[in-house]
Amino acid sequence: MRMILSLLALLTMLGATPASAHTPIVQGYELADAYFRRGNFASAYLVGLPVAQAGDPRAQFLMGKLSYIGRPPIARDLKEAMRWYTLAAGRGHAEAQFALAQGFARGEGVPVDRNRSLHWLTQAATNGHVPAMMSLARLNDDGVAQPRDRAAATDWVRRAAERGDPRAQALYADRLEAGIGVAPNEMLADEWRQRAAAAAEPMGLISRARDIMRERDPKRAALVEAYASAAFVEAKADGELKREAASIMADLSRRMTPADIAEANAKLSAMQPGKI
């Protein structure tokens, strides 16, 4: 109660008005979310709390996030965060379901419970949450908490790809090409790889560059495309992907003229997600 009164005093100083006074509940979440995004956590809490108490799962998830991150003047309280996530998850909020799955996996505010974590992870994925889909794909690939199932893993990757996630599209293309958990289909793999590359997804770009490198006699335009793609990944990625991109650039430079490389660099300067 003391914290609520303190927050109310702070909110008055900031010139904000609690939702219960003048803000209709139906509009309260949008205002609370706007406060949250601007870093005004006290106002987000006071405006969002009555909306969450009225049963809006979006506001309940927001209350969970505020309790989880614990930015002044709101104390970090993992149990309270999981309580709000549970309420929102029960109303079908996919992000809350994913957060609850992580909480049970890590023992944050709740006891570690792999079965409940897997339950909420599956619920989130079923509701279209892409990170949850990719998490389930990894679990099925690795055989963690359940028997290994490559077909199920590929199916979750496919679902994420179909929702427009570029990384999933690149992974699905690789699995289609290699026949991992699905019948090999090079033509379909190339279609998905093109989608990933169009979004400037590093794995998709490298896969496309590899395809061009494997061609017996690639056209000049294809070499320019491959070099620009590899250069983009080399600049943006890290680890093994960055090293592979640098290797591809070195190989390509031996097959290209200075004019070709200049054209590739010009193409690189214009590259951004969605504009390859």
Image (cartoon, rainbow, N blue to C red):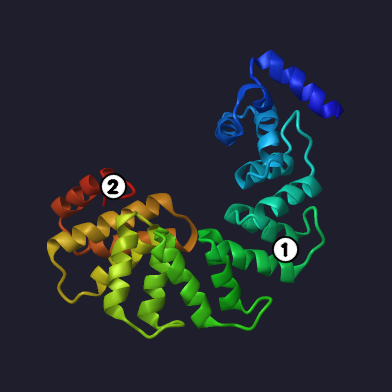
Q: In percent of the image, x 55 and y 34: which residue is there?
A: 30
The residue that mark 2 highlights is 271
Q: What percent of the width, then of the height, locates residue 144?
A: 66, 76
The residue that mark 1 highlights is 105
Q: Quadrant of residue 182?
A: bottom left
Whether residue 169 appears in this view of the structure is yes
The correct choice, above or below, for 34 with respect to 154 in the image is: above
Q: In percent of the image, x 66 and y 16: which residue is there?
A: 14
Point out the tag, 2 or 1, that comes first from the N-terminus: 1
Q: What percent of the width, then of the height, locates residue 173?
A: 37, 72
- Please, what secondary structure does the residue beneath circle 2 have? loop
Three-letter amino acid code of the residue under disc 1: Ala
Q: In percent of the image, x 72 and y 63: which residue is there?
A: 105
In the image, 263 versus 31, the foreground residue is: 31
Q: In percent of the image, x 65 and y 31: which residue is there?
A: 44
Three-letter amino acid code of the residue under disc 2: Met
Residue 108 as seen in the image, left or right of residue 157: right
Q: Nearer the viewer, mark 2 or mark 1?
A: 1
Q: Quadrant of residue 119?
A: bottom right
Q: Quadrant of residue 132?
A: bottom right
Q: What percent of the width, then of the height, locates residue 110?
A: 80, 57
Q: Residue furthest right?
A: 2
Query: Whole-Å distance between the Cαs marked 2 and 1?
Result: 39 Å
